[in-house]
Amino acid sequence: MTKFTPFDAADYLDSDETVAAYLTAALEENDPDLFLTAVKDVARARGMSQLAKDTGLGRESLYKALSPGARPRYDTILKVVRALGITLTAIPQHP
């Protein structure tokens, strides 16, 4: 019988370019839960403890805010993405 290890996206988020592509793809799906999961994957890849220090938020609060179904405040998301070294940008849609 073949054994597989569980897939964890955080294991592959090892460069700024990969992180940017991953978050962009999540944003393009228009699914808030998917985006929160993607941000949480990036946070785990970079270190949740360090992120908690950088944002001034507790680890438990971060996990809760980035869980599917959560409705984090806009300023919380901004704190998190900025602490992760990410800039969210808007571009015009093309018909």
Image (spheres, rainbow, N blue to C red):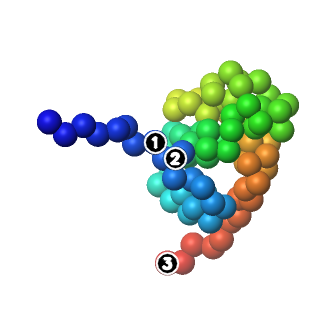
Q: Residue at x 47, y 55 (%)?
A: 29
Q: Nearer the viewer, mark 1 or mark 3?
A: 1
Tell me: residue 15, above or below residue 57: below
Q: Residues within 10 Å of mark 3 (few under 14, many from 20)?
A: few
Using the image, tell me which numbered label, if any, was put on residue 66.
Answer: none
- Kindly identify the amino acid type of the residue bearing the numbered disc 2: Asp
Question: Residue at label 2?
Answer: 11
Q: Nearer the viewer, residue 4 or 53?
A: 4
Report which quarter residue 24 is drawn in: bottom right
The span from disc 1 to disc 2 (Cα, nearest Å) is 6 Å
Q: Nearer the viewer, mark 3 or mark 2?
A: 2
- Kindly identify the amino acid type of the residue bearing the numbered disc 1: Asp
For residue 44, say whether it is visible. Answer: yes
Q: Which is nearer the N-term, disc 1 or disc 3? A: 1
Q: Are marks 1 and 2 in contact (CB under 8 Å)?
A: yes
The span from disc 1 to disc 3 (Cα, nearest Å) is 35 Å
Report which quarter residue 75 is drawn in: top right
Q: Residues within 10 Å of mark 1 (few under 14, many from 20)?
A: few
Name the spot of residue 37 as percent of width and height, x first. Answer: 53, 40
Question: Residue at label 1?
Answer: 8
Q: Residue at x 79, y 46 (%)?
A: 83
Q: Residues within 10 Å of mark 2 (few under 14, many from 20)?
A: few
Name the spot of residue 81 as percent of width and height, x first. Answer: 73, 48
Q: Residue at x 46, y 42 (%)?
A: 8
Q: Secondary structure at mark 1?
A: loop
Question: Residue at label 3?
Answer: 95
Tell me: residue 87, above or below residue 39: below
- Kindly identify the amino acid type of the residue bearing the numbered disc 3: Pro
Left or right? Give the position of 84 relative to 63: right
